[in-house]
Structure formats: structure tokens, C-alpha cells
Image: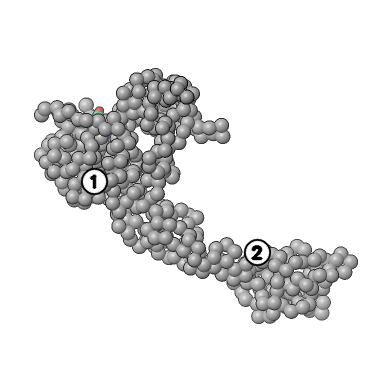
Amino acid sequence: MPVVKRNPIPVSDAVKKIMEHTSLWGTEEVPLTEADDRILADDLSATHDVPPFNRSPYDGFAILSKDTAEASETHPAKLHVLETIGAGQVAVNQVKSGAAIRIMTGAQIPNGADAVIMLELVKEMDEHGESYIEIKRNVKSNDNISFQGEDTKKGTLLAETGNRITPGLIAVLATFGYHTVNVFKKPIVGILSTGTELLDIKEPLQPGKIRNSNAYMVAAQVRAMGAKVNMYQHREDDFESLYENVKECLKESDLLITTGGVSVGDYDFLPAIYEKLGAHVLFNKVAMRPGSVTTVAVHEGKWLFGLSGNPSACFVGCELFVRPVVQSGMKVRKPHCKAVKAVLGADFPKANPFTRFVRAVLTEGVEGNVVTPAGLDKSGSVSSLLAANAFIVLPGGTRGWEKESEVGVLTWNGEGSEWPWDSPLFFKSQATRTAEKQQS
Ligand code: AMP
Ligand code: MG
């Protein structure tokens, strides 16, 4: 097959092209008990006040504050205790002048009472089988009352479409009786690894063969993004059978990720498979390292991601291009890797015409962030992925990078960022930045 010349496009253009094609995944109702980490598909509001009634925040006595107006060390106010109510109980008596009701945390304030005095601040007494308390201080009206609606007023917006369901949100939803919740469906991501050299992870090593690590890595990545995985048996580099495999897998997937075989080598059949499928290729070369051959196509409403077989290239391609498709389809407001600034902790002498994504360790500190390359920076290296919690983004330029340079960094754990990453750090070469600095 002749080698077809491909035109590299900038990373930012590649992401832009992808964002033009995203669509929603649909919604489903799930029990609150199964809603962890799902993405809300509705705006939800408070259906009543919280607390729903005035209640006591302490164990104490519900009283009429004016009964303590004259109270002092020497002239304590003496009140008759009518009854005791625990949380969940409602008083049968009214609190009238001269009376008190013993009340526990969370119980509804009895009618007539306008304050609560804490248990520790009264002296309890028993006289002829009747209970009394003595109060030696002045209690003000409304003291120690949690008022209806002081936490949340009925109608308050609790959470919005696109919010991830956290334990905190689950607490709030349970408070308002949302026992089921409308969430976005998880898109189904098919994962098909290609390469005649691949072994299943259960197989012993054989000459010339390696285990398929990419499929497992990508599966973990897309699950963390909120997708559901269909993992397929890896396949050999054979055009005809691979074409059939891709066609079949695509039927069952919203997105089909293939790994390997997307380059221009003798056994790289994915480009020809896209062509035979009649898929609309958004791009097949990106000005980045690793992963310049990453190819993304759409076909009959489905997505095809042709990721490079190099583990690091595969990882980067997945985070850069698959993440926003998965998450935009669930209206996640920050569907891209999180962009932060950091200072380089070591020289990075390698020059590069393309934007480079360097596996790195990011340390966030009060003095600022420091980022250091994580070991071997070869695209085939798996071990450097182990330590890495970030990518340093070094925009293309002819020179290497010096320690202490300010650089853009992408992370993939936790909340993401909006697009575009609003810092020139991600797009301007060091040469351009230096020139601009000298001019100003
Ligand atoms: P390819 O993209 O097919 O040219 O593969 C590039 C490199 O990645 C080769 O060294 C492959 O052996 C390696 N590779 C391909 N697929 C996988 C995989 N699923 N797991 C680990 N390494 C792979
Ligand atoms: Mg290959």
C-alpha cells in the first residue's frame, strides 16, 4: 500500500473538530442507591423547607424567654417541667408562663416556647414527685432554635443538569425524598485492541509477543470518565477480518476505540478500514507527541477512535479526545482534562516541532505547583505511566525547556476544565513567549 501523506493539525483544532460533533447520550431513571458518580440529567429543587419545622439544636428545656427576664445568680427563675420530648415526638402541652418542656436535639419546638436553654445551664430538681428547673441567667427570645427553612428554603435550586452525584448530593437528594433520580445514560465504549504481537493478559509470554495492556488501561480510563465498557478479544493485523470485527463491534457501541494499527506501517490497517466503512474522518494526524497518528472518525452517529498502540500515546489520545465526547454527552460542564500552571522541576532538553505531552508528576504546594517528568519519556514506556499524575504540555518550538520555566499541565483525576484551556502556556512556543517578553 502506498504511504499516504497526512496533514498534521494542531491539538486545539483537533479538539475543536471533536466538539462540533458531540451529542447527548439520553437519560434514564436510577434508584438513588445506584446513583453514585452518575451525572444528573435534571435541575433539582428543594421540595420543602429544611428543617421542615422549628426544632431544637440541643438537649435542653423549651421555655418562654420572658420568664427569665429577672433571673440571676441570687434570684433564679423556677419553672415547672411539664413533659419530656425526644426527637420525633411532639409535645402534648403548651409552654405557658412558669412552665418548661424538656426537649432533646432535633425535637419540634413546643407551641408557646420561644427559646431553648441547654441542659448544662439549668439545675434540675424534684419536689413532691414534680420536676422543676432553676435558671440563673437571662435567655433571649429565639435563643437556640433552628428555624424552619434556615438550612434550605422550599424551591431552592439544589443541583443542576451535568452535576456529578457525590455523597454530599446524595444526602441532599435523600433529604427531599428523591428516591430515584434522572441521570444521563453511560455511553457504551467498545474497546478493540489490534496487533499480531498481542497476548491476552492470562497468557504466558512467547517470543516476539507482548501482553495487551492498552485495552485494560483504556477501559479504566473511560470508566473513570463515566462510560460503560465492552471489551472485545484482541485481533491480529488482518485487513478483511479486522474490517468485519470493527463493523460488528461498532454496532454494539456508541464509541469504538481501537488501539494500534493506525500508523503507516505495513500492517496498519485501520486507515483503510475507515475508508472501506465510509466513515467521516475528522483528522488522522495531530501535531503532537506522542500519538501524532491518532485518528478520529464519525460513522452513522457513532464514534471511531483510532488510538496509537504505544501505551503513552494511547493514554494521551484517550484523555484528550475521548474524554470530552463521553462527558459532553452528559452535559458535564468541564469535560476536558483540567488545565493548571506549574513550574518545571527539571530541564527538558528534548527539542520538538510538535506539541509534546510529557508524563509527569505534579506536586501542588502553597508556594505553587511544581511538575517533573516521570522517568523514561519514550512513547512506548508503560512504567512512566505508573508514576504520572499529569502531562506537561510543551507547545512545539525548536528549543528544549529549562528548569523553572512556567508550563501548562493537564490532569485527569477529579474535576476537569472548560475549553479552550485559557492560557497561552498551552499553545505558544517558548520562542514566541521569549520574543514577547523581550518586546514588552
Ligand atoms: P502500533 O500503533 O500498532 O504501531 O503499535 C505501536 C507499539 O505499541 C508497538 O510497539 C506495539 O507492540 C505496541 N502495542 C500495540 N498494541 C498494544 C497493546 N494493546 N498493549 C501494549 N502495547 C501495544
Ligand atoms: Mg501494530
Q: Secondary structure at mark 1?
A: strand
| Residue drawn at 68 percent across, 70 percent down | 103
221 shown above or below 268: below
| Residue drawn at 53 percent across, 32 percent down | 368
Q: Nearer the viewer, residue 131 or 7?
A: 7
Quarter of the rendering containing residue 220: top left
| Residue drawn at 20 percent across, 40 percent down | 281
| Residue 123, percent from left and from top | 80, 67
Q: Report whether residue 38 is seen.
A: no
Quarter of the rendering containing residue 80: bottom right
Q: Foreground mark, 2 or 1? A: 1
Q: Mark 2: few, some, or many residues within 10 Å (few <14, many ≥20)?
A: some
429 shown above or below 15: above
| Residue 77, percent from left and from top | 82, 71
Q: Residue furthest front?
A: 439
* Cα–Cα span, label 2 and label 1: 55 Å
| Residue 42, percent from left and from top | 39, 60
Q: How is the image coloured?
A: one colour
To which residue does mark 1 refer? 303
Q: Nearer the viewer, residue 47 or 399?
A: 399
Q: Looking at mark 2, is its residue's CB closer than 8 Å to ligand 1?
A: no
Q: Quadrant of the N terminus?
A: top left
For the residue marked with disc 2, what is the amino acid?
Pro
Q: Nearer the viewer, residue 185 or 356?
A: 356
